[in-house]
Image (spheres, rainbow, N blue to C red):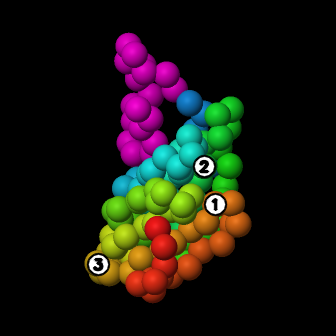
Amino acid sequence: MVVAGGFTDRGVQTGWVSLPDMPVAAWGAMACVLDGWLYVAGGSDGGSYGRDRMQMWNGPRWELKANLPEARVGAACVATTNGKIMLIGGKIGRLSGAFGTSSVNLHDPMMGRRRTSPGASLRL
């Protein structure tokens, strides 16, 4: 189990190992594992603004990946069987005026590309 982002007092607890900090701090971020790599998407700066960054833990370090099409907090993050990552729902926009969304974003980590609201014919 990996805990990424959130708030901490930097205390060490038995059984947990601290990884290096992510390049971009994120609260309320979405995470999923695809092909053994941990992806952390979006989240908030802990204040009024959402984040539009995708970060990947590759074993020894974090990498920044393609930006999300929009800042997003609290969405579902799903790894698909064909190597894609889907972000579903959540809140977009400035958090003080954020609204829920039904949009779905599809990201292909191998290609560094993303699509918004894929059609029903898209194979997952």
- Horizontal and vertical percent for residue 110? 68, 60
Asked which secondary structure carries label 3, the reply is strand
Decide whether residue 7 is among the magenta residues: yes
Q: Nearer the viewer, residue 7 or 68?
A: 68
- Horizontal and vertical percent for residue 46? 40, 57
Say what amino acid the circle numbered 2 marks: Met
Magenta range: 1-18
- Horizontal and vertical percent for residue 49? 44, 69
| Label 3 with label 1: CB-CB less than 8 Å | no
Horizontal side of residue 102 vs 109, given as left or right: left
Q: Is residue 31 above or below residue 118?
A: above
| Label 1 with label 2: CB-CB less than 8 Å | yes
Residue denoted by label 1: 109
Asked which secondary structure carries label 2, the reply is strand
Q: Earlier in the sequence, mark 1 or mark 2?
A: 2
Q: Report the disc number at residue 56.
A: 2
